[in-house]
Image (cartoon, grey):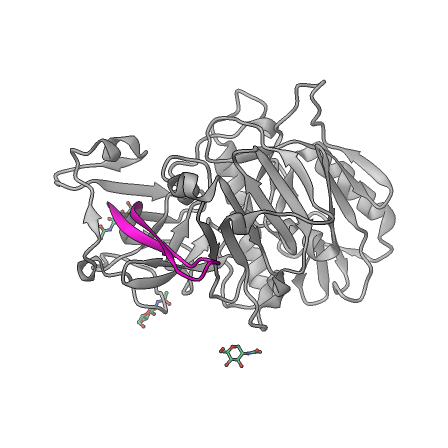
Amino acid sequence: MNTLSFLILSFFSLCFSISFSHAVVVLVLNLFTATPQNHHSTIVNAAHRSIIRVNHFYKNSLASTPESTVIPNTGSDIVWLQCEPCKQCYNQTTPKFNPSKSSSYINIPCSSILCHSVRSTSCNDQIFCEYTINYGDDSHSQGDLSVETLTLDSTTGSPVSFPKTVIGCGNNNTGRLEVQGSGIVGLGGGPVSLITQLGSSIGGEFSYCLVPLDNKESNTTSKLSFGDAAVVSGDNVVSTPIIKKDPSVYYVLTLEAFSVGNKRVEFGGSSEDGDEGNIIIDSGTTLMVLPADVYKNLESAVVDLVKLKRVDDPYKLFGLCYSATLDEYDFPLITAHFKGADVELHSISTFTQALDGLVCLAFLPGGAIFGNLAQQNLLVGCDLQQGTVSFKPTDCTKV
Ligand SMILES: *[C@@H]1O[C@H](CO)[C@@H](O)[C@H](O)[C@H]1NC(C)=O
Ligand SMILES: *[C@@H]1O[C@H](CO)[C@@H](O)[C@H](O)[C@H]1NC(C)=O
Ligand SMILES: *[C@@H]1O[C@H](CO)[C@@H](O)[C@H](O)[C@H]1NC(C)=O
């Protein structure tokens, strides 16, 4: 097996670099889109996106239990980047990918089976296959479905190439990626996600370590690794099974309960209840999203412990806010009890400085998503052959 390690370039949590033929581009991991603006608006925007994304996940699923059902988020796990010539592109600080300069770039023809196997493709009047992706937050990308050589840095020293990786070359893109991202990479389990395409060469293994969101001034970056480099081992590693559910785009886990300090808040998931597979782990949603009743119980458990003045969130996004700063008060530890894996979440993962002097519980009611704020400073490893997600407390600025 090739041993691959994949390094990140940019300042904030979810950007990393990837090489396509002649160009190195920075892609955003899934949908999370921190901006170079100040932290408040980042969090507020992120909260809005979390809400929109949750609505998207649960739309049309009213017939079944909203808390435990996921619906296809069409094409959300393809890899795409902005391409010249642009009909409509968002501003990007780095040069856009120019396929005419690459000898390994090939458009996929309409007649290809591949064109028909990827969701949301069309041929219109053209010879070449066109894809369209609409994300839950109104971002969208449209362009040519194509193949290109993908190159990853390797821990063995020499880069490893993956010829004929399916990518979307987008020339009509709108979104909230802002300037740092050239596009979006999908890490889900769908047919053309990066993980599926790298396939056996990475042994179904990848891991990521997200540096804290408020770490932007320093030069430390998040890290994404594949293959042997992605094995999460050593002390303090806990693992929980991935529950197979359709669509395969999502990684679904079983969460049994939370603890806030010593108080346990039940979440449900147990094999006796047939309630396995009740929460999505997602790098594209920022906040933690919980079923309304669980949220309510968790919120009261926090209220019981935090001896601070409760204030309203002027944006009316968060249900529980305090007049405080994150560093000046010792907010309670919240533990997520996944099946077989207790994961301790420190205050940077569960509370957010929504405004100066305003700290809010970074959870929302109305779904079941373990978002990326909660995953900061955890080495998170997915082993798709074993069918597990592992967590290890880690200072991600130091890996
Ligand atoms: C870009 O895509 C949007 C949404 O599909 C469409 O409304 C718009 O006309 C497209 N713009 C161009 C220049 O093709
Ligand atoms: C994008 O860049 C162009 C040219 O630099 C500038 O005129 C435009 O205002 C920018 N748009 C946004 C949304 O920042
Ligand atoms: C960050 O990296 C850049 C380029 O390597 C360097 O010039 C700068 O001094 C670094 N900043 C900090 C805070 O380490």
Q: Is residue 209 left or right of residue 331?
A: left
Q: Which residue is pictured at 30% across the width and 42% down the height?
A: 132
Q: Which residue is pictured at 37% across the width and 69% down the height?
A: 93
Between 125 and 199, the one nearer to me in the picture: 199
- Per the image, is 119 magenta? no
Between 111 and 368, the one nearer to me in the picture: 111
- Stretch in magenta: 144-166
Percent position of residue 323, x then y = 77, 61
Q: Is residue 300 left or right of residue 53?
A: right
**Quadrant of the snapshot with the N terminus:** top left
Task: In the rendered view, tell whether residue 12 sits above or below residue 55.
Answer: below
Q: How many numbered dots are placed on residues in this image?
A: 0
Q: Which residue is pictured at 18% across the width and 37% down the height?
A: 123
* Residue 26 figure quarter: bottom left
- Per the image, is 153 magenta? yes
Q: Is residue 260 left or right of residue 154?
A: right
Between 145 and 234, the one nearer to me in the picture: 234
* Residue 157 figure quarter: bottom left
Q: Which residue is pictured at 81% across the width and 52% down the height?
A: 332
Between 171 and 358, the one nearer to me in the picture: 171
Percent position of residue 14, x then y = 51, 57
Q: Determine the main secondary structure of the stretch shown in magenta.
A: strand
